[in-house]
Image: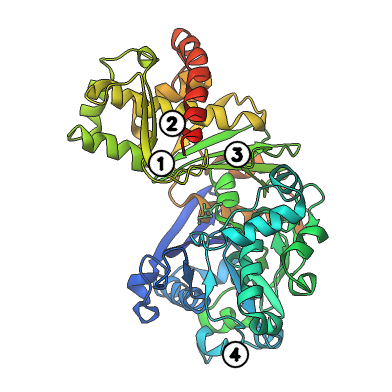
Amino acid sequence: MAKLFLGLDSSTQSLSAVVIDLDAQKVIYEKSLNFDQSLPQFKTKHGLLPDRDPLVKHSSPLLWAAALDLLFAQMKKDKVTLGKILAISGSGQQHGSVYLTEKTTATLAALDPKKSLVENLDGVFARKTSPIWMDSSTAKECAEIRKKLGGIKFTASRTGSDTFERFTGPQIRKFYKTEPKAYEKTAHIALVSSFMASLLAGKIAPIDFGDGAGMNLMDIRRKNWNHDALKATAPSLVKKLPLLADSGKVVGPVSSYFVSKYGVNPEALATVWTGDNPASVIGLGLTKPGQVAISLGTSDTFFGTMEVCHTDENGEGHVFGSPTGGYMTLICFKNGSLAREKIRGQYGLKDWNAFGKLLAQTPPGNNGGVLLPWFEPEIVPRSNKPGAHRFDLDEKDAAANCRAVFEAQALSMRLHSQWMAVAPEKILVTGGASNNPQLLQVIADVMHCRVQRIEVSKSAALGAALQAAHGCLTAAGKAPKWDKLVAGFTKPVAGSEIQPDKKAAKIYDKLLEKYAACESDALDGV
Ligand code: XUL
């Protein structure tokens, strides 16, 4: 019998499903359901509820539950053999939190298939809305918690990251301060990931070490709740948080709600979910320590896996538990495609081909010209004042500016990932801009490393499906090796490997010093 596993990804704007046939090493089904379009009654825009305060970004946990019903109904309609699914896992947008009342445990245990999940969940929310990762309204709470934990370095070394506005701890503190009664009524706090896992399991599910590390509440080394952080955040918090556990760990059989309503295999296992970035680490095949991937999207993200936990003293990068064991790091550069497209637009270049031709007219190192393309406030390095900065670079020189944006992005990645102390054999690159060979060449030369493209559609949902397989086989005493498990699903694009050019690499070693000085200079002026 085919071994089928279902992975779900509850992201900002959509809920996605990937079903894999493990033995055939094939994805047999993929579907995404866009929240705004499929569930207009919730009145979200790009998955967010409207708010007058531009810093406040909330969504609705009921919307996520409704989407789960809708996606299962769609899978049934699409004749996915849900009766053959052996286990279900998932991933969620990180940091977002759900506030539940005492009633939740009893409600989850008795989900009525004659009603929708939305109807079933009547009365379980102590807070109607959920703050999500895009929220940046907790600067004050970040400062308060950071101060109590002893500053940036100590906060990062204890919890894996400095306090960040979107992280769950500062969000919980704000809720406690502004709505103390509702906080008191909250019996359980879940992350998006553990909330969705709880619906599937019909009971409160644990939070995993990957998503748990995005809260500023988990001791990153001991992988348990850090009592100093809990105390610095809000009273009685330990009673409201669930257990922490390995992602993919079996929570129990899937709730009978999904069995009778959608024909899911009654023996299917519901497992612990993780965050979307940790799940992508699996979906991109980063199963061994020291592996690195770069995702070139609207923002660029730099992922790495580490055996031993190092944290970033400067508090720019994050360390999370990796679902494949050990740790993973995440560094988020906000001005990714955003900056590349801005420069392309500024010089009126119709496509990336034209951009590449122009860039090729200038030598690696750009004759010392440096651009800091912080068109939007940058996360790494932290700079709240948007604006581009040019050093020995003439804004009128289109070719030099095209090269400068690529070089700045690669140099910034090298500079701000040094704390990770990993020397990868090869860097995998994914996302929209990864089919730009000039950008990949600059990354290879700056990083002194081979670079290869990998194109996995829905890497988080695929990672979640593989996590379901890993959890299910482990529970049966047949724990598979991660590298073997992912091998057939996560192949880099054949023939796309790029070698570093030794001469250019030397030039970039020198330019790195200048680049770092330019950053300091620009940050001083902010
Ligand atoms: C990671 C982060 C985002 C969300 C996106 O720290 O905030 O990548 O996980 O869903």
Describe residue 345's horizontal placement relative to residue 468 as left or right. Answer: left
Crowd rating for badge 1 (residues with CA inside 10 Å; few <14, some 14–19, many 20+): many
Describe residue 126's horizontal placement relative to residue 379 as left or right. Answer: right
- Residue type at mark 2? Gln
Earlier-in-chain disc, 4 versus 1: 4
Q: Secondary structure at mark 4?
A: loop
Residue at (62, 28) in percent of width and height: 418
Question: Which label was assigned to residue 409?
Answer: 2
Q: Secondary structure at mark 1?
A: loop
Describe residue 148's horizontal placement relative to residue 113 as left or right. Answer: right
Question: Which label was assigned to residue 286?
Answer: 3
Q: Distance of mark 4 from mark 1, alpha carbons?
A: 42 Å
Q: Mark 4 = which residue?
A: 123
Residue at (23, 24) in percent of width and height: 398
- Residue type at mark 4? Gly
Q: Quadrant of the N terminus?
A: bottom right
Earlier-in-chain disc, 3 versus 2: 3
Res. 22 visible in picture: no
Earlier-in-chain disc, 4 versus 2: 4
Q: Mark 1 = which residue?
A: 335
Earlier-in-chain disc, 3 versus 4: 4
Q: Is mark 3 within 8 Å of ligand 1?
A: no
